[in-house]
Image (tube, rainbow, N blue to C red):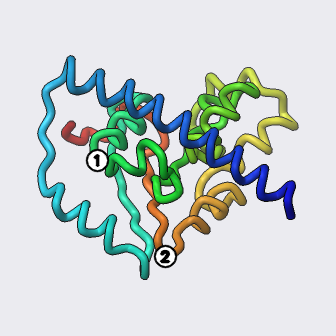
Amino acid sequence: PKADNLITFFSQFASMLVVSFTSLCSYTFVKGFCDFNMYNYDKFENAFYDNNHRPLLTVGNHQSTVDDPVIISLIAPLRELSYDTRRLRWGVCAEEICFKNAFLSLYFGAGKILPIKRNLRHHSAVLSTISTSDTDTKRQGGINQSRFHAFTNKLRPGNWVHIFPEGRVCQKSLNAPN
């Protein structure tokens, strides 16, 4: 029990350091170099503070790989970005981007990001470089993977879950407006 408490303490401390540093850098960049507007923030804030009896699910569109820390640093309440990260959002990121080595795995894990396998069936250039036995494993992406189920299990009362559902950045073939 004492060891478990120590592990929990260090895990929360690491999360606080990673989230605070990343959020401060993201917020400073956006405030200093970008022009942005937020609409209906009061609705998000009400949902965030009134979610003790239900989970909060937010969905965003990708424009770049840094969307998650930038958007979260702008909308999350300051307390959750600094010293109390327990209510900060859970998110997912492709394992080949955010979890490709031990340092990135620790960093993103501390930032409450879970690894997810993307379904690479349509990326023939990537698949041609992967061995056949590896291809079957790589194709087990999508919503029917155990990692996605672990992510959806975070949808508990009081938790915030954020997702970028399109699975990759720059969806040019969708003909969707930006």
Instruction: Locate residue 135 relative to residue 48 in the image: left or right.
Output: right
Name the residue nearer the viewer: 128 or 176.
176
What is the number of the mark on residue 75? 1
Label placed on residue 157? 2
Q: Residue at x 54, y 41 (%)?
A: 16
Numbered tag placed on residue 36 in the rendering: none
Residue type marked 2: Pro
The kind of residue tagged 1 is Ile
Q: In the rendering, at what x and y percent does residue 123 appear?
A: 58, 31
Question: Can residue 82 be seen by looking at this rendering?
Answer: yes
Up/down of 88 relative to 128, above or below = below
SS at mark 2 in the image:
loop
Q: Position of residue 41 (x, y in %)?
A: 18, 55
User: The C terminus lies in which quarter of the figure?
Assistant: top left
Q: Residue at x 82, y 35 (%)?
A: 134
Secondary structure of residue under mark 1: helix
Seen as rendered, the residue at the extreme top is 33
Percent x, y of residue 78: 34, 46
